[in-house]
Amino acid sequence: MITVKKSFMIFVSLFSLIACSQKPIVTPEATASASAASATPWVEGTEMALASPTPWVAGTETALAVLSSSSTPTLVPSLTPLPTFTPAGIPPFPTFTPYPLSEGTFSPVLYGSGSFLLLGGIKKGDGWISGVQAAQYMFNEMDYDFFNPNGSIQIQGSILEFDPTCGNHFMRSSVVMPEPMVGVASGWITEKRGTTGLSTDDPAYIQAVAEWFQSQGNSPAEIRITCILQVDMEGDGVNEVLLSASYFTEKFAFLTETGDYSVVLMRKVIGNNVLTIPLVKDYYVSSDPELEMSYPNTYTLAEAVDLNGDGTLEVIVDVRRWEGWGAIVYRVDGQNVREVLRTICSAP
């Protein structure tokens, strides 16, 4: 009995000695836990990212491997390629070969004072055509006659250019005029009917404009006439009066408030009555008493000339707006007014 107990005690002692001399066995799971529990080295600029669990992002495996395998962490950014795209809203540059027409069958209509916008044109058999159509028939050797109420001038044509910003054609010239003029092919207008400028302070016309506003249910605080032209529109010996008036409380070209306006009117005798007929009218009424960013158009009478050769004058109206300008051509038949050409381009 004593022999058995002694042998058992020797066995237990030897087993304890062997167990104490062995190194601990470390599993992969334990290694991962230990790494996760160790401090993450601080990298400048990453405080927010390291303060919360970082989600896995495809393509960052290389960066993480370098971070875990180096004693001095080096971040290797994984850059996502920038997307490629085609900008929208910019029309392609039109390409065409000019196709000159026989003399007297076509004329473009241009407007400006040195950089001339192509408003459109007139083509025999087709009537009024757009600027895109008119550009096909223009060539560099063309000469042009330009008109305004103060006179006329002839200039030589130059290369027609396309402005992708506003999607319109224009022609530059070395001749810069003090005022905008309307231009056609040289010789297209053989006889220009005279226009007479009248005083914008004439009380009779100020009263006429005020009465027209009242008939529309509006009563602006002030009448400011910017141009008055007297001309025989139809060649019947009876003069019409064309006038433009504009008023804006603030001088900024993008703000309006109630009572601001810009109009072009025609005073015309029909039977025994004198009628006031609007060609274009903008009258601003706001529910907000404060100024609004309306980016208004300012219309100013520019010229009256027979562009299509039918004996009745067209009215050319200058248009100015915030970072933009252009012109509109109106056709007047009795009491009916019709817009036939328009180009308003963003300022360069």
Image (spheres, helix red, strand yellow):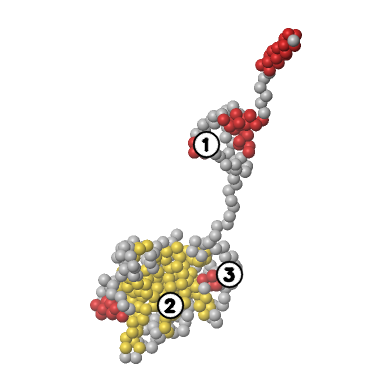
Q: Secondary structure at mark 1?
A: helix
**Circle 2 or circle 1, nearest the eye:** 1
Q: What residue is disc 3 on?
A: 98
What is the secondary structure assignment of the residue under circle 3?
loop
The tag earlier along the polypeptide, 2 or 1, is 1
Q: Earlier in the sequence, mark 2 or mark 3?
A: 3
Q: Which residue is mark 1?
A: 50
Callout 2 amino acid: Tyr
Residue 330, numbered circle: 2
Pointer 1 local density, CA inside 10 Å: few below 14, some 14–19, many at least 20:
few
- Image quadrant assignment for residue 116: bottom left
Q: Is residue 257 left or right of residue 158?
A: left
Reply above or below: 225 against 233.
above
**Residue 50 location (% of width, % of height):** 52, 36
Which of the image's four quarters has the C terminus? bottom left
Most foreground residue, 181 or 75? 75
Depicted 139 relative to depicted 52: above or below: below
Give the percent coordinates (x, y) of residue 344.
Answer: 45, 68
SS for dot 2? strand
Q: What kind of residue is marked 3? A: Pro
For the N terminus, the image quarter is: top right
Nearest to N terminus: mark 1 or mark 3: 1
Q: Amino acid at mark 1?
A: Leu
